[in-house]
Image (cartoon, rainbow, N blue to C red):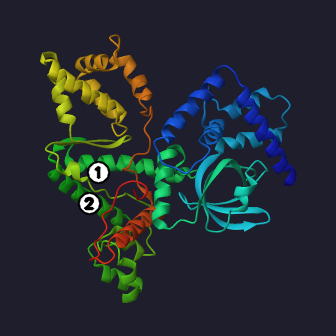
Amino acid sequence: MNDLLERSKELKQELVDFVYDAEGELATALESFSKDQLEKWGKVQTQNQNHSAMAIDMFLSDGTVNGKTPIDYFIAEQKGLSESDRQLLKSWNRTFNGLFEVIQVTDAGYVLMNWLTTKIYRVQSNGLQDEAKLARLKPGEMLLTRISPLTDKQWIFSGPMELLGKLGKPKLAVAIGNFKDRFKGHLYGDAPDLLEESWKSVEIYHQEFVDFFGESEITLSGSEFNKCLQEFQDIVSEKQLEKVGIDSSKSIKELAEESGLSQEEMEEMTADLDENSMVVKQLLNSGKSIKMVMPKADLPKPLQRAEKLTAIVHPRWGNSFLDDYQVLCDRLQASKSSDDVELEQLNKQIKRYLEDPSITPYVWQKLAEQYPESLEAALQRVLGNPDFNVKTDLQPTLQKYGKPQEPELPETASVPMHLNDLFQEALAEVNQTKGKGKKKAKPKAKTGFGVR
């Protein structure tokens, strides 16, 4: 094993040097990949002292040139590699980012749990890591790092590590939320089953939405939509409970009695949670588990007050809630007869839609389909490019403004039950702290990962 560790160190250093020394397409891809990552991470508050090193390490396995990773290029060009070297290098294409808790420190290395998946890994250092940071790793410590396969059961650290210390539930929830924002492509590490379940849940959510509201795009007042949204989410939650045989009509007390819990245990378990919460009912039905659960969302207050709120739902892009979408559609429809003042208002709204990260490419696709000529003219003005063509130039333009080319897992996706429990408990703890000395209020569920 020591020989293999030493060889992994040598190969990793050779791989990094190969990428640094590369020219042509590989060099261009590295520059573009690093630039994109650093710009994205610059919008997220983190403690990371070495974004550049993280971006480069990610490029080795995540970057692509003509459909191949830098690791693939390295293997193809290094003719003196043994078969075992090649197999080890190929396995490094499975390197992933994770938010880990140190479970145990042994002479042989570290036992880590990835908090996003609860999977356990035995990880060793191959000598390329910061010894001072490794010395600080103790049980209970949280760290953000990348790991690569060494054998079928052993892993090694890859790239820099951020030490986050021992985190209480609220701070852990925030750390998970930040991880999601920074590393969407690594959300479930090497647990493709969880990722697949999440994507399936987005499709199911879309179909349930269409079944409930009648179509995938609706416009209502904010207050009316919020009432419908809560009713819709309750129905979806009921269906999830029914799938595992939980009777949602039974009271918490009845469920507790069936579970064999005492009155004290029941009160302690549900003290800070909504008594109708599906999470509570899960806790009281230990023999009936739900693998993943749809996060319940409260519509933000400003949107609840909107005169016209448009909800657009897509089976891959997820939800878009827009309080000025109809205004934009009206402006685009009337743009040919608009005066300079009205055109300026349209231009400002178009610019804001380009810069707003919450406006998905799917929203732009709908606008381009419905108002191709007026949208093209508006973008020509906003971009200062009279040759802009909405059919050929829209997608590259959206990418320049940081919008993804392919859908990223949206907020409507279901999350693993252990994460949903963490966020509920973290919110309860935050509300309890805020409400000290006051009458305890029930916490409101939020969407997405983490407490913000």
> How far across and down, in percent of the image, does residue 314 sit?
33, 40
The residue under the point 35% across, 62% down is 240
Q: Quadrant of the C terminus?
A: bottom left
274 sits to left or right of 335: right
Which sits in the foreground, 399 or 381?
Answer: 381
The quadrant holding residue 247 is: bottom left
The quadrant holding residue 292 is: bottom left
> How far across and down, in percent of the image, does residue 189 sit?
57, 50
Q: In the rendered structure, find residue 208 and report the number of the disc placed on it.
A: 1
Task: Residue under label 2, please give it.
Answer: 235
- Badge 1, how many Cα within 10 Å: few under 14, some, many 20+? some
- Vertical position of residue 273 compared to residue 370: above or below: below
Q: Are marks 1 and 2 in contact (CB under 8 Å)?
A: yes
375 sits to left or right of 29: left
Amino acid, disc 1: Glu
Which sits in the foreground, 424 or 254?
Answer: 424
The residue under the point 29% across, 75% down is 440
